[in-house]
Image (tube, rainbow, N blue to C red):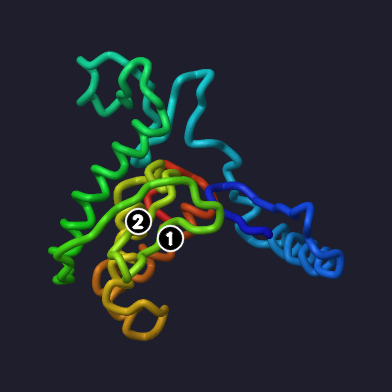
Amino acid sequence: MAYIAYGRIEATIGTRFPHERIGETLQKILRKLRSPAVSQLSFKSMLDWPSKTIYVLGKKRKLTNDPTLMDDKNYFFYEKGSDFTKSFDSSFRKYLLYRIKEEATRSNIRIDFFKVKVGRYRSKQASFRSIDKLFEFDRRVFAYAPIVVDSVIDHELSHTVSIRHDKEFYRILYRQIPECIYKNSKWIITTGNFGSDPYAL
């Protein structure tokens, strides 16, 4: 398995991988290495634990346990002694619940009931499951600027109307967000440049 996302090249070959497919997989990895995105990959993580900083909504913030700094946009607050990953996922989930409703209203997409799950997904930024109205988001999406996060939300909202990537899907998507801004946002996520503005590319 090989893909480029979040400013990194990911490649894995399992121990039970069939020998006859190793050559095919290595070819896929080499093609990824020749991708024009490679020269622009940031190779940086959203979280730098030694310096206690994290990218949230396109801005590098200091981690803090001080409740008086909870609403300060220069800091990301989590309670002392709490599970950091759970705190981070909970913050992103609250943000998504609000933004999904806002974007759906703005785009006249009716969605009366939905669920949101945040986690670490190896090969997707987000998905929508129509059977139980579940939106799933990779927590790394929260590192990017609000307009970039909205582009991912708009993509998944379009799936509530058309589950396939067909003409109707793209008609709905580009009604919500201009095509060039959507494509620039995808490039920003691929290359892992957290603070980039898709309007500036």
For the N terminus, the quadrant is: bottom right
The one of 174 and 133 positioned closer to us in this rendering: 133
Q: Is residue 27 left or right of residue 186?
A: right
Q: Residue 184: which numbered mark, if any?
A: 1
Q: Mark 1: which amino acid?
A: Asn
The one of 127 and 165 positioned closer to us in this rendering: 127
Identify the residue shown where x is 55% and y is 52%. Answer: 122
- Report x, y in % for residue 63: 38, 21
Residue that mark 2 sits on: 199
- Report x, y in % for residue 121: 50, 51
Q: Name which of mark 2 and mark 1 comes first in the sequence.
A: 1
* SS under mark 2: loop
Identify the residue shown where x is 37% and y is 40%. Answer: 58
For the C terminus, the quadrant is: bottom left
* SS under mark 1: helix
- Report x, y in % for residue 196: 42, 46
Disc 2 to disc 1: CB gap under 8 Å = yes
